[in-house]
Image (cartoon, rainbow, N blue to C red):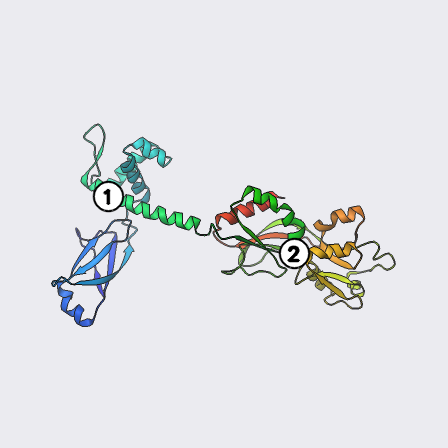
């Protein structure tokens, strides 16, 4: 390993270089004293390094560059100069960067002062690039094009990947799916996969992009925003309870219960009131979108969010037996951190629906 300290006129002061020379110990020992490190570099692109030996053979070098940011010119000054070099006009350069032509001129002067190099020849009516200015403009253009290409690649990297939405079957059937056509109309380019699963999904590498969870929020390691506030009701058809009505939540163990598959709004409520396993009545486990249908048919008692049964209660199809004393809700839950564009569009649309 060889470490080369920056040398004036050979290596720019904003880089320091670590060179690892490949080859056998004998080869390195034979040629190391004759190696001349030739550097072809620019401020914003990765240089090419080659070690030439006296015999004309080439030793390939692995080079690590470490930027000394304190010595680098301000990025705003480099951007201003590149824009002027591209457009040949202070006004057009300012328009391209949404600043005044005066600001562009000042940034270029700041850059010249930082480098102690004249980049523009201002002796004529129209300032012209100096030889140093031409060289810097060429490398800046190349560097910014590389940056722009990488930014575009990152922006579209996940564009074709469908948006995975995890939620409970009840929420999917009663709230999300009836509204989903509106999202498709507004964002036809975004494919959506609805994972209607009562289990709490893990936001791992293969996990959902967003989950709509029932609860009271406060989950660790994620960001949660209340979407729909609700309470939980125990309900049944009037015909089901006409002869025998439960007197307390724990009394529900005497009755047939209709419960959603997995851990859901109903199972959490029943466990809270000590009805973990039904006694005489038994339990019928159904997908979330079928539990209310079975309750309306008089097949048993179910616990659900009040927002799903308000119209049934008002019309008399169902009767409210018990009600939660605590406020719950459905929350938009996402990973903490940066969100891709399709996820931002979906969560914004969700919030617009309430």
Q: Earlier in the sequence, mark 2 or mark 1?
A: 1
Q: Where's residue 321, x and y in %?
A: 79, 55
Q: Is residue 216 visible?
A: no
Q: Where's residue 4, x and y in %?
A: 20, 60
Task: From the viewer's side, name the closer residue of 306 and 175.
Answer: 175
Give how far apart the Cα atoms at labels 2 and 1 are. 60 Å
Judging by the rendered image, the residue that carries numbered circle 1 is 136
Category of crowding for the residue at label 1, using alpha-carbon neighbours closer than 10 angstroms: few (below 14), some (14–19), many (at least 20): many
User: Mark 2 falls on what kind of element?
Assistant: helix
Q: Where's residue 69, x and y in %?
A: 30, 51
Q: Where's residue 248, x and y in %?
A: 80, 60
Q: Which numbered marker is on residue 169?
A: 2
Q: Is residue 49 visible?
A: yes
Q: Residue at x 16, y 69 (%)?
A: 29
Instruction: Single out the mark in the foreground, 2 or 1.
Output: 2
Q: Residue at x 57, y 42 (%)?
A: 185
Number of marks: 2
Q: Which numbered marker is on residue 277?
A: none
Q: Quadrant of residue 275?
A: bottom right
Q: Quadrant of residue 260?
A: bottom right
């Amino acid at each position: 390993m060889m470490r080369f300290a920056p040398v004036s006129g050979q290596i720019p002061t904003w880089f320091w270089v670590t060179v690892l020379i490949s080859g056998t110990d004998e080869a390195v020992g034979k040629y190391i004293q004759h190696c001349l490190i030739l550097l072809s570099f620019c401020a914003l692109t990765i240089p090419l390094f080659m070690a030439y030996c006296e015999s004309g053979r080439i030793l390939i070098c692995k080079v690590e560059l470490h930027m000394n940011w304190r010595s680098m010119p301000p990025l705003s000054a480099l951007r201003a100069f590149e824009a002027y070099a591209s457009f040949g006009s202070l006004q057009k350069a300012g328009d391209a960067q949404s600043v005044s032509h005066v600001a562009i001129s000042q940034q270029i002067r700041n850059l010249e002062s930082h480098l102690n190099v004249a980049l523009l020849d201002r002796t004529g009516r129209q300032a012209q690039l100096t030889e140093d200015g031409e060289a810097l403009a060429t490398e800046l253009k190349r560097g910014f094009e590389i940056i722009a290409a990488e930014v575009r690649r990152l922006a579209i990297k996940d564009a074709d990947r469908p948006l995975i939405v995890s939620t409970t079957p009840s929420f999917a059937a009663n709230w999300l799916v009836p509204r989903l056509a509106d999202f498709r109309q507004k964002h036809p380019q975004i494919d959506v996969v609805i994972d209607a699963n009562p289990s709490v999904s893990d936001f791992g590498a293969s996990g959902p992009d967003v989950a709509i969870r029932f609860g009271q929020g406060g989950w660790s390691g994620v960001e949660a925003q209340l979407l729909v506030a609700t309470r939980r009701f125990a309900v049944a058809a009037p015909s089901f309870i006409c002869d025998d009505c439960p007197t307390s939540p724990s009394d529900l163990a005497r009755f047939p219960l209709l419960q959603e598959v997995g851990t859901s709004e109903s199972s959490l409520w029943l466990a809270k009131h000590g009805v973990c396993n039904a006694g005489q009545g038994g339990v019928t486990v159904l997908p979330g979108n079928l539990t209310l249908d079975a309750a309306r048919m008089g097949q048993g008692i179910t616990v659900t969010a009040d927002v799903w049964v308000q119209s049934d209660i008002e019309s008399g199809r169902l009767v409210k037996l018990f009600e939660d004393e605590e406020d719950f809700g459905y929350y938009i839950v996402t990973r903490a951190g940066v969100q891709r564009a399709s996820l931002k569009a979906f969560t914004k649309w969700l919030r617009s629906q309430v």
